[in-house]
Amino acid sequence: MSESKRISNLYQSIYNGNPWLEVNLTNTLENVTAEQAYRKINPNLNTIWEIVNHLIQWRRNILRRVEGEVVTAPDHNYFVPVLDPSEAAWEQSLQNLAKSQESWNTFFEDFDDADLEKIYVNNEHTYYEHIHGIIQHDVYHLGQIVILKKLL
């Protein structure tokens, strides 16, 4: 199996598979309502919804980078308040998360392992580091979501 296929399988497992950490994004978010996702547990913490939107934007950012585009993260680091706390808007965020996963799956279908060594010009890190970094980023924030759910 190619390295990119192994990485793709790992990323997919974190989204909706059976990763070694025993939780994934889909199952963790499955029964979270818009009200719960919007609830601010502590003024110093992000909400579940803010974290999900942050994940989506970073997934898009890194995908654009490894597709060859130069992208700079905004000062707010993709943490922005949710303006529409409706169930429909929450469902849209979950659909956007699913679409981001589909985009990554499509990306990996044609990805050449040799490109893992390519260097992203803005920070001198390899595409390999970026791809593993976004997986680590998802896992980090998945842990936050798990904790926030327990505090609801």
Image: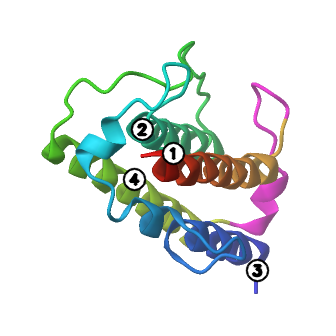
| Residue 72 in sight here | yes
Q: Is residue 104 above or below residue 119?
A: below
Q: Mark 4 = which residue?
A: 97
- Badge 3: residue crowd in 10 Å (few <14, some 14–19, many ≥20): few
**Residue 131 image position (x, y, % from top left):** 70, 53
At mark 3, the secondary structure is loop
Query: Camera-side residue: 140 or 100?
Result: 140
Q: Earlier in the sequence, mark 4 or mark 2?
A: 2
Identified at 70% across, 67% down, the residue is: 112
Identified at 21% across, 33% down, the residue is: 85
What's the distance in space between the residues labelled 4 and 2, CA to CA? 8 Å
Q: Mark 1 = which residue?
A: 148
At mark 1, the secondary structure is helix
Magenta stretch secondary structure, dominant: loop
First to last magenta residue range: 112-124
Q: Mark 3 = which residue?
A: 2
Q: Earlier in the sequence, mark 4 or mark 3?
A: 3
Specify the farthest residue to the front.
151
Q: Mark 2 = which residue?
A: 53
